[in-house]
Amino acid sequence: MNVYFILFLYWLLFYGVHSLMASSQLKIWVQTTLPFWVGPYRFLYNLVSLLLFALAFNFQRKLVAEPIFEGVVWLSYLGLVLIGFSLAFMVVSFRNYSKSEFFGMEMWRTKSFNSALGEQLRIGGLNQLMRHPLYTASYFFFIAYFLYKPYYSTLVFSAMGCIYLYIGTLFEEKKLVQQFGKQYQDYQEKVPMFFPLRLKKKS
């Protein structure tokens, strides 16, 4: 079996389990069938995601480096600079998110999947320019990492990451509309999804 297809399956497993555990259907099933696990659910979600990511990335790291193009050294340096930029971008973007909710402490305290429903819509900081700055930073990282290591393995990694980010964001947008209603719909009209640019609609 082709090693890049195996790599694809590894990342498909990571993103598939990540999506399954984030789905409302599984959370409802856990709440009704295994209520004891509601509290530590977010913590387990992060732990499983981290382990599967490490598994996939370790397999990718062991593959023979087959460059797509060679001799363009400046692209690697550009990629390295952009990696630093994307990581700094992530740190700044993360300031507008609830740390206790992200790491699972809030869910463990309330033992409820609905602990975030009472929160206000956060539109300060970078969220004034784009609705999902953390995902924008992730896009920069995927592109930068491919430029830094322009291999077939990193192409699989970066391409799958970018595709998953977009699809996952569409589902997240639906959840946010359900949670905040017209407030979020108005926010969608005013602020772009990923990049602080909006094409003017033809009249």
Image (cartoon, rainbow, N blue to C red):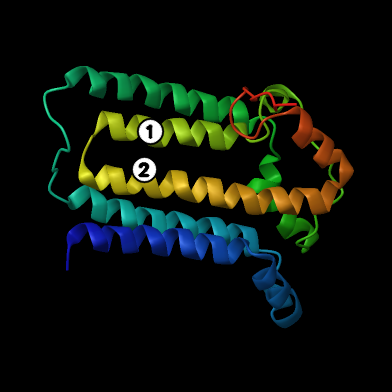
How far from the left and from the top, in percent, is residue 127? 70, 28
Residue 166: x percent and y percent? Answer: 54, 46
The answer to which of 52 and 13 lies nearer the viewer is 13
Q: Residue at x 59, y 32 (%)?
A: 194
Residue carrying label 2: 158
Near mark 1 (Cα within 10 A), the count class, few <14, some 14-19 or many ≥20, is many
Q: Is residue 79 above or below residue 103?
A: above
Q: In the picture shown, does residue 27 fall above or below 158?
A: below
Look at 22% across and 45% down and name the residue there.
Answer: 152
Residue 6 location (% of width, % of height): 25, 63
Q: Which image quarter: residue 79?
A: top left
**Residues at discs 2 and 1 in contact (Cβ within 8 Å):** yes
- Identify which residue is drawn at 72% across, 53% down: 174
Q: Earlier in the sequence, mark 2 or mark 1?
A: 1
Q: Residue 104 or 141: which is nearer the viewer?
A: 141
Residue at which label 1 appears = 143
| Left or right, residue 168 beside residue 80 | right
Quadrant containing the N terminus in the rendered view: bottom left
